[in-house]
Amino acid sequence: AQSVTQLDSHVSVSEGTPVLLRCNYSSSYSPSLFWYVQHPNKGLQLLLKYTSAATLVKGINGFEAEFKKSETSFHLTKPSAHMSDAAEYFCVVFEGGGADGLTFGKGTHLIIQP
Amino acid sequence: DAGVTQSPTHLIKTRGQQVTLRCSPKSGHDTVSWYQQALGQGPQFIFQYYEEEERQRGNFPDRFSGHQFPNYSSELNVNALLLGDSALYLCASSRTGHTEAFFGQGTRLTVV
């Protein structure tokens, strides 16, 4: 069975400083992993995806994530936060093989301080 | 490309009523999935439709049913509404064989 744990429910950083959103996963297979962002009253937008190619994945808006199988982690980072990054971020796992769709973490609320 | 579109954007229903939500997938996509997102939670998988059949189902009761039409659009039906069904309902579309899913903006359902 697949599952996702987002280690922080809220993260607050100052504008221009680095962002780190932490995610651990559990999967019986080699999973695909994703990060989605949700701005208030908006749908979900795909930031990046890992599908067993390069372990360092680059996404949109300067975000990137590193797949570490030994640590079962897929942390999301950005070198310099912007006010527009304030949103809810979801780590998502999909292991295929008849698994029940995408499994989402509970989300991390990113707050950007001016 | 209009992306994934959902209707209506908001609606209010009374306990015990029935509701139908609609979704048009992104152009070129043939698979539609539905998710329920309760306030402050991550989305939870309800079911997935492909070739007009339910292919996978999450842990939701039979009150939740769906349909996919020949043009790949889809409906989610919920019968005998409960207060706990109040949530944002998200539709996602994808192409068979591809894991990447695109989401609509959702339908906010409030049950009173």
Image (tube, coloured by chain):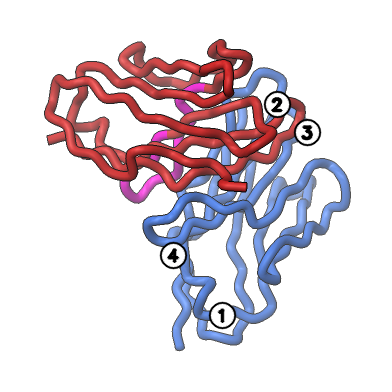
The C terminus of chain A sits in image quarter:
bottom left
Magenta stretch encompasses residue B44:
yes
Foreground tag (2 vs 4): 2
> Of label 1 and label 3, which has the lower sequence position?
3
Cα separation, mark 1 vs mark 3, equals 33 Å
**Amino acid type, callout 4:** His
Q: Given the image, what chain letter belongs to the residue carrying mark 4?
A: A
Q: Earlier in the sequence, mark 1 or mark 4?
A: 4
Letter of the red chain: B
Q: Earlier in the sequence, mark 1 or mark 2?
A: 1
Whole-Å distance between the Cαs marked 4 and 3? Answer: 29 Å
- Label placed on residue A30: 3
Alpha carbon of mark 2 to alpha carbon of mark 3: how far? 9 Å
Q: Residues within 10 Å of mark 4 (few under 14, many from 20)?
A: some
Q: Nearer the viewer, residue A86 or B97?
A: B97
The part of the image, by quadrant, that contains residue B26 is top right
Q: Are marks 4 and 3 on the same chain?
A: yes
Res B38 seen here: no
- The residue carrying mark 2 is A96
